[in-house]
Amino acid sequence: MRPMQVNFIACFIVMFTIASFHETVFASIPQENPEETTAITKPPTQKSSDSQKQLTWPVTSLYNLLPVSAPIVHKPLWGGFTEYYYAHDPETSYFLSVPPNIKKYRMVILIHGGCFINGSALDHEIFPLASHFRRYHYAVASLNYRSLTQTTWPIPLDDLAKGIHAIINSQQGKVIDITLIGVSSGATAAALLLYAPKYPGIPPIQHFIGLSGIYNPNSLAHHITSYIHETSLEHFTLSSALRFSGTPKSKTPALLIEGAQDYYSDRSPHSQASHAEFLAHYLRSNGVSSRVYWANTPGYTKHDGPVKLMSSHELTFMREIKHFLLKV
């Protein structure tokens, strides 16, 4: 056989193998009709009902091989969650899991941290929280929102307000009560939306849990301010964004959990000047129920301690959470 014939046959075999692999990987992807394709491959731009369209892209061990623009619903750890868009930007989406075969249920809405600069609804710190509440038959939603590397302040709060509205509206009265949980700057955002008169309002929330939140403009640790500066966001001053003054917009009870040695964000942890005590004082002074819980358990006293403690099932801590959620 001539060399050219051998090369031709070899190329044909390779092309056939690639085509077969492509067919095998993508054959299980549901085929949508032409009118729905646009709504699935990018955020909705026309009908408002499209914002609640369920994405059905399958999760497989080969998800990293899909094109970057493919609408991957969730990573393998996030089985059971579906992604929905609430606005016209790829970053404005939320992941939702609803307990099956239950007509009425409680809901948790999670807001990730990242100093308003990075982070994601699928962060490794968020997944244990989602898993914990799903175990107790809660509906769980985790919100994405634009960071300050993509937009300007206070648009991240505007995004979150829209997302929370969309999540609650999507449930059509099925939810008994709602707990809003924020981590780090996510707790900051949640508190500003709930209480600060300056920022957008959100629907009624029954409980707020802040994990390592940043609230006191006078107690910002150097790590936080220098981190913002290093990311070239000199135009954004976190201290000016923290505006807890006047009458709080809501009476939502707050449980503020902070590491007893959280020197990453708090200049004076475990003191009256700390972030948690600062917000608790503001709320109590205005007739809003609030409680501060200091994480003293070894291994859980730093900035990431409270979110880890939340999923550790440590007995004393879980009693505190249960008491708070069932008290009101």
Image (cartoon, grey):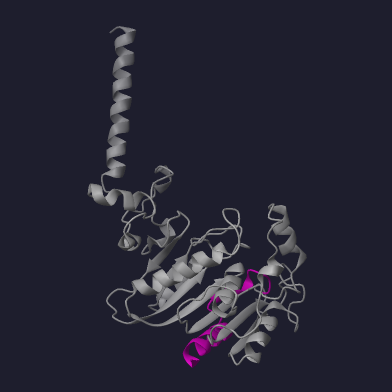
| Residue 308 in sight | no
Task: Give the prevailing secondary structure in the magenta stretch.
Answer: helix
Residue at the (29%, 24%) spot, across then down: 13
Does residue 120 sit above or below 256 in this rendering? above
Q: Quadrant of residue 298?
A: bottom right
* Of 130 and 299, the residue lying toward us: 130
Q: Can see residue 130?
A: yes
Up/down of 209 relative to 61, above or below: below
Horizontal side of residue 8 vs 272, given as left or right: left
Q: Is residue 166 left or right of residue 234?
A: left
Viewer-side residue, 116 vs 245: 245
Q: Nearer the viewer, residue 200 or 312?
A: 200
| Stretch in magenta | 301-328
Viewer-nearest residue: 78 or 118:
118
**Residue 127 location (% of width, % of height):** 48, 66
Q: Position of residue 104 (x, y in %)?
A: 32, 82
